Image (cartoon, helix red, strand yellow):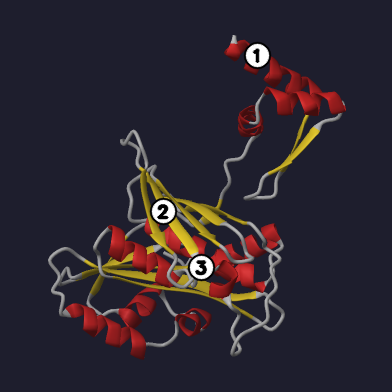
Amino acid sequence: MSSKYIHKFHSEDLTIRASSVVTTELVREVQKIHQSFPIATIAMGRLLTGALSMASSLAEEQQVSIRVKGDGPIGELTTDASFESEVRIYCGNPKIDLAPIDGKLPIGQAIGKGLLTITRFHKFHKHPQVSVVEIQSGEIAEDISYYYQQSHQIPCFVALSVSLDRNGDVRGAGGVILELMPGAPESLVPILESKIKRGKPLSELIVSGASPLEIVSEYSHTTRLKESQHPFPIKYSCPCSPERVDRTLKLLGKASIAEMILKGTPCEVKCQFCGRAFSVEVETLRRLHDELVTTDN
């Protein structure tokens, strides 16, 4: 399987499980869709990469949504990812521009303090599972790792990387999530921490073309790893449609739709996730208004 897939591994001693994914082309697509500046490109790339890896551990037709809501100037970040490796992302301010600090773009400053909300949608559950934790650094990887430790009591190591060239274009992107499995000895934690500190930077591994196994092995305490297939190519996918636009407009209520009708021109709606534009004709607005009236009566 190529780098267009999520690669999942477990150690032969059943102490860890890990996932590795290279998302370079995907993040390039996101940068193009949102016309994002470097800080937003990095933040979105890290978040959707983490979401894809998390979703791969669910079951078929299930998905995870991650919302990062801090008080920083980048605004809200929201991403949805499915077990089938489909993902989309929204950024409140994709054209944020802050000066580097010590030579690095201040992703944490751009996000600020606030909350990380992770929602898991399970096919056979009436209600989604929602977990909320405080943003720890705004660097994304540390925040997802903290979520695992707080919400699942699972020691977890998360590395997410998006590297750009001097023109702000994406050179490489990807991520690794490594979790201790139930029954694994706690003494393994400092061993893994030491290995991770001594390992090559993830950005270097990705840009150099390292294989998924080589990437995971750089962070694992053992190279005796077995891969389990995840046969879904990663792709950017947004389920927006005219029907979804209609449902969204109806949520605005009769008064708002009536104001649109009085203008006498089509209502223009743009999807915040994929940029697709929809034009809702006045006749459609009248139909939606009439449906709301009928429902109320």
Q: Report the residue at 69% width, 68% height from top.
A: 96
* 117 and 240: which is toward the camera: 117
Q: Is residue 133 left or right of residue 209?
A: left
| Dot in front, 1 or 2 | 1
- Quadrant that contains the C terminus: top right
What is the residue that sits farthest to the top in this orientation? 297
Q: Is residue 228 left or right of residue 86?
A: left
* 33 and 207: which is toward the camera: 33
* 7 and 130: which is toward the camera: 130
Residue 139 image offset from top left, x and y in percent: 49, 72
- Quadrant that contains the N terminus: bottom left
Q: CA distance from mark 3 to mark 2?
A: 15 Å
The reply to whether discs 3 and 1 touch (Cβ–Cβ < 8 Å) is no
Could you classify mark 2 by the number of other residues whose Cα lies within 10 Å: few (under 14), some (14-19), or many (20 or more)?
Answer: many
Amino acid carrying label 2: it is: Ile
Residue 157 image offset from top left, x and y in percent: 33, 73
Q: Is residue 150 left or right of residue 210?
A: left
Q: Is residue 231 above or below residue 101?
A: above
Q: Is residue 13 above or below residue 85?
A: below
Q: Report the residue at 64% width, 27% height from top.
A: 250
Q: Quadrant of residue 141?
A: bottom left
Amino acid carrying label 3: it is: Arg
Q: Earlier in the sequence, mark 1 or mark 2?
A: 2
For label 2, the residue is 118
Q: Is residue 191 left or right of residue 280?
A: left
Q: Earlier in the sequence, mark 3 or mark 1?
A: 3
Question: Residue 46: which numbered mark, if any?
Answer: 3
For label 1, the residue is 293
Amino acid carrying label 1: it is: Val
Q: Is residue 221 visible?
A: no
Q: CA distance from mark 1 to mark 2?
A: 36 Å
